Image: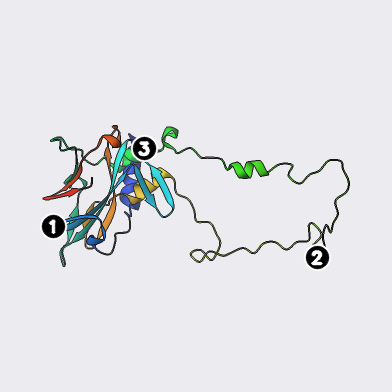
Amino acid sequence: MRFCLLLLSLGAAFGQGTEPKPKVEDYEVHAAAHTAAIGAEYMVHSFTRGDQVFLAKDYLVVEVALYPRKGADLEVRNADFSLRINGRKAVLMPEAVSIVAASLQHPEWELPRTPNAEVDAGAGNAGVVIGGPPRNAHPFPGSTEPGTELPPRIEVPKDNPSGIEQPRVKADVLAVETSLVEGPHHAAISGFLYFAYRGKPASIKTLELLYQDAVLKLK
């Protein structure tokens, strides 16, 4: 319980949401609600930021973007959203991000890392020869002696000229940081919502996001 309360407080302090697109029409699914325009994207189980992608296996993830009416403030509340599956009357409500983050901290929620077979196969005693005639330092005209070659030129990425690798964020931290931030807002805002669901996504024939008086058909 203390752990969940701690994550909840962290979410309130460090929640940033995602980067909303310039206008609501940039989302494939969008609509006009009572107090704001809304765009949405169904992510199935994934949530992302940059090149980092994680899965929340027991949740359906929806990225939501809200655009307040010009000159108006907007009060964002997760309780205003719900998810309707296959036209059922019973709807799913968003889960608290603290609960989502807590589930992501368990090892069984982590994605397995696939070893690099090429690196493993090429490491070890590569280039070592036992016995046999000595190697010719110059096997053909114009060749250079082994060990004297110039190192290959390293291309500096334009988006990261310093060459310093950016810090990686853990799944539970990223879930909190990119979740939809509740409270008053004066400009466009976007973030992920998580709906607890243990069924198979393939069984979902229709999927609707409900917000105030708007209905967005995600699938």
The residue wearing badge 2 is 142
The image shows residue 96 at horizontal and vertical percentages of 27, 41
Discs 1/2, front: 2
Closer to the camera in the image, 217 or 64: 217
What element does badge 3 sit on?
Answer: helix
Which is nearer the N-term, disc 3 or disc 1?
1
The amino acid at mark 2 is Gly
The amino acid at mark 3 is Ala
The residue wearing badge 1 is 35
Task: Measure the alpha-carbon separation of dots 3 and 1.
Answer: 33 Å
What element does badge 1 sit on?
Answer: loop
The image shows residue 100 at horizontal and vertical percentages of 33, 39
Task: Measure the alpha-carbon separation of dots 2 and 3.
Answer: 62 Å
Closer to the camera in the image, 13 or 40: 40
- Where is residue 138, by image quadrant? bottom right
The residue wearing badge 3 is 102
What element does badge 2 sit on?
Answer: loop
The amino acid at mark 1 is Thr
Closer to the camera in the image, 168 or 90: 90
Discs 3/1, front: 1
Closer to the camera in the image, 1 or 190: 190
The quarter in which the C terminus is drawn is top left
The image shows residue 122 at horizontal and vertical percentages of 67, 44
Which is nearer the N-term, disc 2 or disc 3?
3
